[in-house]
Image (cartoon, helix red, strand yellow):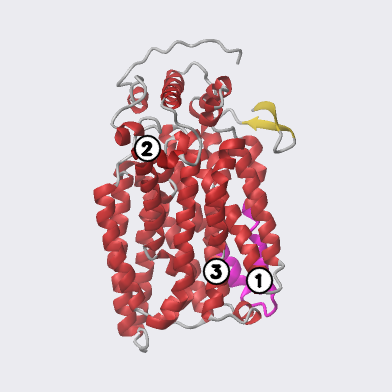
Amino acid sequence: MYNRYGYNKFFGAWIPLWLPRSSLLISILLVLCSSITSTTFGYDGSMINGLNILPSYTNYFSLTPATTGLNTASLWIGGCIAGLTYGKITDSIGRRPALFWAAICTLIAVVLQTAAQNIAMFVIARIILGFGTSASGLTGPAYLAETLPLHWRGWGLGMFNDFYYVGGLVAAGITYGTSFMSSTWAWRIPSLIQGVFSLFCIIIIPFIPESPRWLLFRGRRDEAHLVLAQTYSNGDLEDKVILAQLKEIEDTFEYEKNAGETLSVMQIFRTRTARKRVLLAVSVAVFSTIAGNVIASYYLGSMLTNAGISSTTKQLQINIILNAFCLVCSIFGTYYIDKWGRKMTAAISTMLLTVFLFLVGALTKVFGNSSNTSGVYGTVAMIFLFQGAYSIGWTPVLYLYPPEVLNYPIRANGLGVFQFFLNGAALLIVFTMPISLASIGWKTYMINGAWDVVMLFAILYYWIETKGKTLEEIDELIEGKKHSDVPDLEKIIKGEEVIQVEYEEKGL
């Protein structure tokens, strides 16, 4: 283990950095720590799904369709605020401490949510919870994209969001277990356990390094060099791949600084290529939200009731099975993300889920109010296939593609815009869905399916492919030129290219 200490004024002390010597272990810890966002979001979606089914929760707050939507959707109000403000914080204090403070904010919100005495207190707690989770959702992907080695980036950022279903599965089991309780602890216990993931994040932080790109941009070259060695080559500072990656990042940063690019919010609007990058990231946020998964993620109970299954116990059991199925599908999609590519994975997923969503609508219309058991369970099967199709593509792509297409000067603020649109779209959809399902029922799925057809054509026409490229090499795909004469890193790793890089001893 490396045993080093560093002072950080935001932590207020010299904090130990016990970094493992194994690059693989560091990569695993990076993913586990950063995954607080998706795990908490997944837990929240499944928990609210379960709570909306529990009489002890709905009766305690005397919920109507409007207040059900408010209790659920208030999470994204805080998310929108984080999207507008936390990018600057992440650039200022570093990815690692920004992740720490996001976890602290989430813990505070969990305590307030658990202790809620009325709708107002519950909503305020969920706004703070949304801020904390979206702050980590902004920081985590940037941190992983900048710190994970090239050959682990697709897997790591794909798994980052796969943890959504880990949280969902845990919440589904807990809400099912507490559903047999008659007191308010039936919903307070699941609320309290939501904070466990933030605690895990705080515990892991001392064992992981800062982003090498953040360090290098701050002029801390020696530390950036060391972190690259720790994440790529088990600490070997003279590894040719490390030296090539370091030079590529340095050359790109020098070009961007000479071109007048800054870390300001206005930089995301300043040039045509910056606007294109942000638009690509925003398209992921909006498309992933309006695809239709929000209905099953937060209002599975309403879907199952419309399909003909009204038993609370059966709905909670289906919630558990669905989360387990989606976890398997998301891991399958993550495994193939570097083979299929980001663009094709999203297109295949969208095409399949569109077909299944239309079938959910058609079957709900025909069998929703009937006693035909085969028809009812056929509808449930289509819900499973729809969620599985979404999980194969959109789950790994959601937090993988945006930090790849955003270059360093706009990455944190661009991800802030991404989070703003992700939360804004979710706020709109989640608040209106219970009203739509209650008013027009099966037609909701048909309208949603029509949006998905438009999404598919937009992805095929507008998206670019980023697989197999370092963050700096992606510049060539968007701007038409690469800002370093270093050969592509993948070719160096495979031995197809050789580079001579001078190594200067810097006292490391």
Q: Estimate the spatial distance between the alpha carbons at disc 3 and disc 2, rounded to whole Å.
A: 38 Å
Question: Which amino acid, mark 3?
Answer: Thr
User: Looking at the image, can residue 299 be seen?
Assistant: no
Q: Are marks 2 and 1 in contact (CB under 8 Å)?
A: no
> Of helix, strand and loop, which mostly describes the magenta segment?
helix
Which quadrant is home to the N terminus? top right
Query: Residue at the spot x=63%, y=51% of the render?
Result: 198
Residue position for label 3: 72
Which one is in front in this view, the residue at disc 2 or the one at disc 1? 2
Write down the region rendered in magenta.
171-197
Q: Which residue is mark 1?
A: 120
**Left or right: where 479 falls relative to 93:** left
On screen, residue 10 above or below 186 = above
> Which one is in front in this view, the residue at disc 3 or the one at disc 2?
2
Q: Amino acid at mark 1?
A: Ala
- Using a 10 Å C-alpha cutoff, classify the residue at mark 1 as few (fewer than 14 neighbours), some (14 to 19) or many (20 or more): few
Q: Is residue 495 within the magenta segment?
A: no
User: Mark 1: which secondary structure?
Assistant: helix
Mark 1 and mark 3 lie on one chain; the one further toward the N terminus is: 3
Label annotation for residue 271 = 2
Q: Earlier in the sequence, mark 3 or mark 2?
A: 3
Badge 3 vs badge 2, beta-carbon distance below 8 Å = no
Element at label 3: helix
* Residue type pointed to by label 2: Thr
